Image: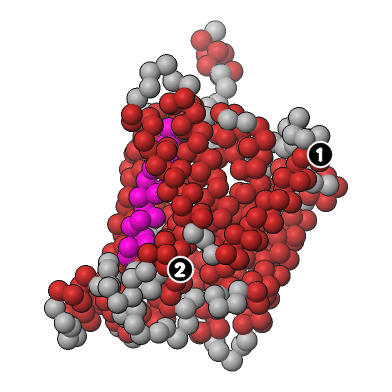
Amino acid sequence: MKTTASTSAPVRLRRTLTLWDLILYGVIVIQPVAPMSVFGVLSDRGRGHVVTTVLIAMVAMLFTAISYGRMARAYPSAGSAFTYVGQEINPALGYVTGWSMVMDYLLNPIICTIWCSQQAHVFAAAIPYWAWAIFFAALFTFLNVQGVKTSARVNTGLATGMGVVVVIFFVAAARYIFGSPHNGAAFFSRPFYDPQLFHAKAVMGATSVAVLTYIGFDGISTLSEEAENPRRNILLATVLTCLVIGVLSAMEVYAAQLVWPASQPYPNIDTAFPYVAGRAWPPLFVIVGFTLLVANFGSALGSQLGAARLLYGMGRSGALPKSFFAAVDPRHHVPRNNVFFVGVIALGGAFLLPAIAGEATGFELGANLLNFGALIAFMGVNAAAFVRYFLHAEKKMLGNLLPPVLGFVICFFLWWNLSTKARIFGAIWMAVGIAVGAWKTNGFRGNLIDFELPPEES
């Protein structure tokens, strides 16, 4: 009888992930080269104070990471900002948070397509940017339609390779810096504060973009059911991942600014870091450029499929036309229509954003728009943590008050300092979503959609 009982018991996920496993997962998801793709944009907008912007963004993300970790205790299997807000505050606000995240999902493939096309054009200038954009958008779409999945081992291998490249860059940068003349202590402190270039508004505007360096840390909360002691380790891993990425990113951009001071313009803002690496050691121009191309290639693949799955969830629940968005390819078990749809949006955005960016770049405008939605989601998580762990708590504790409040205030301040164009286009996107939601739910009297992503098909 014991054998029968044990055989019929439901199969459960095993709690095998240690704190170190969770931190490693977070670093792999965010990538060790996270600040390199956006380095030129941060330097241009922040007037050279890239280190300062990365560190300020880290502080904001640390407070938000605490809120994410705490909310993962309450919702160990959900792990999503819109769930936290919808359950703890209000379903309508949860919908608004989810709608802001839809923008993130759609924009990530766009900025990855732009960056890959820019970098490929640097390597092969004879082929125009528009041809590379078509090539990458088509390739991402083709691979995702085939149901291509990257295994955890491949991701770990890629992250290890990126880590090796980072170490080589540090060695080359140190040799270059100490082998070149400089004007004493001021040379080494200038990346943090340059009195001739510093402008508070410019630094805060760049910090709003620097948040992109940390996007993805919230993914740790989705591993709650497989983590040892999740109530403790999810919170610690989320915070420590932000800390590790923040310190590593600050070291990378600090070395880069010493190699190539902000007073000297870059040949291309979007792909500035490979030029910096090439100055430290010429072979690194190709090595770092190729590494970032691979990193953005992988990010584009994952984000396009993630966006397609989110649209599938919306179509399945009736928020979008079911006949198109809820269809699944019977052979490859992927939402094929949605993959094509996101591919078309990525291609269109790769042409449209550079055209309307004005003085900025298409990548910069896309990054600003992506952070518009991300910062709204982060504010929502902080607000949900405040409501659950302070407002509704029997015992009011300062430790439950300060992190979510400070996280919310800092995220709001960064959101407010996004570029004007990003705020305008972001506001239009949110207005459309709110209008649709209000219309389909008769003034939000009912739930429009379950924003939870559907499980992977086996």
Q: Which residue is farthest bottom?
A: 126
Please identify the residue farthest to the right as the structure is shown. 323
Task: Give, as a three-letter code, the residue at label 2.
Answer: Val
Q: Which residue is mark 2?
A: 38
Give the number of the disc on residue 311.
Answer: none
x, y percent for residue 414:
46, 55
Q: Is residue 243 left or right of residue 40?
A: left
Q: What secondary structure is found at the residue carrying circle 1?
A: helix
For marks 2 and 1, give the CA distance: 39 Å
Neighbourhood count class around disc 1 (C-alpha, 10 Å): few under 14, some 14–19, many 20 upward: some
Residue 70 in the magenta stretch? The answer is yes
Q: Would you say 413 lies left or right of 258 here? A: right
Magenta stretch in the rendered image: 51-71
Residue drawn at (69%, 56%) of the image: 428
Discs 2, 1 touching: Cβ within 8 Å: no
Location of residue 369 by image quarter = bottom right
Residue 29 placement (x, y as % from top left): 46, 53
| Residue 107 against residue 387 in the figure, above or below | below
Whether residue 130 is visible to the viewer of this picture, yes or no, is: yes
Residue 426 in the magenta stretch? The answer is no
Q: Amino acid at mark 1?
A: Lys
